[in-house]
Image (cartoon, helix red, strand yellow):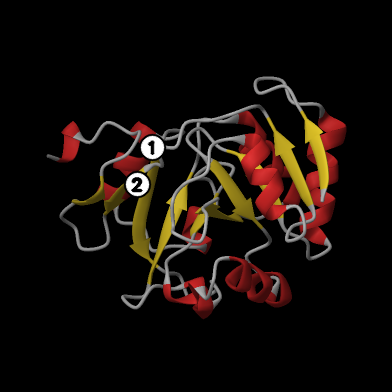
Amino acid sequence: MEFFDLHPVTPQQRLINKAAEVIKNGGIIIYPTDTVYGLGCDIFNKQALERLFQIKNDAITKMFSFVCADLKDIAKYAKVSDYAYRTMKHLLPGAYTFVLPAAKDVPKKLWSKRKTVGIRVPNNEVSLAIAREVGNPIISTSVTNRKGEVLSDVNEIKAIFNPLVDLMLSVGNLSNQPSSVIDLSNGTPEILRIGAGDVTLFA
């Protein structure tokens, strides 16, 4: 695994380009978000997705989120009601994952059993810059150990994932609190997980 430290606010463009190149070539990276470190790959690369499922210990049964650079092309990946769009536009970028009905072009392996997907637009320039450079959303799934516990210590992440992924971009230790997850797929918002994002709007 290649490892690079980068500036959290003004990340070095050459390292963003390198991470995007790894993803475009079917690789898997670890990168910072506005909450925890994420494992990422191209949502349209089948080989990379299969490898990611193996790393996450048969996580094909779990829902993965997409990091999008913005909401401009969101209709390509999810079916968005007017209410959902207004809500997302108000709160994003931010520490939220919004669950929406999957659009037909999204690989079905990334659909939940309810045919939904999670959408993320983190308040983090590193992850947004990578998604912009790749040109389509990248996977967002928390870096965890085998017990499913979120890992926040860089040295621990390196020790576990060094043989498993291709590149890690580090901004130092992060929190271990993931995003709040809000289901907007049925018209009425449902809080699925209370995390870093303020959920009082939906309580």
Q: Are marks 2 and 1 in contact (CB under 8 Å)?
A: yes
Q: Residue at x 78, y 61 (%)?
A: 27
Q: CA distance from mark 2 to mark 1?
A: 6 Å
Q: Residue at x 17, y 32 (%)?
A: 200
Quarter of the image for residue 125 reads top right
Q: Is residue 193 visible?
A: yes
Residue ranking furthest to the left = 203
Q: Residue at x 54, y 53 (%)?
A: 140
Which residue in the protein does label 1 denote? 89
Which residue in the protein does label 2 denote? 85
Q: Indicate the position of residue 132 as horizontal and vertical percent values.
A: 69, 43
Q: Nearer the viewer, residue 24 or 50?
A: 50
Q: Amino acid at mark 2?
A: Tyr
Tag 1: Cα neighbours inside 10 Å, few (<14), some, or many (≥20)? few
Q: Amino acid at mark 1?
A: Lys
Q: Nearer the viewer, residue 53 or 200?
A: 53
Q: Residue at x 44, y 37 (%)?
A: 176
Quarter of the image for residue 102 reads bottom left
Q: Nearer the viewer, residue 35 or 71?
A: 35
Tag 2: Cα neighbours inside 10 Å, few (<14), some, or many (≥20)? some
Q: Nearer the viewer, residue 96 or 153?
A: 153
Q: Indicate the position of residue 193 as horizontal and vertical percent values.
A: 27, 49
Q: Indicate the position of residue 154 as horizontal and vertical percent values.
A: 64, 36
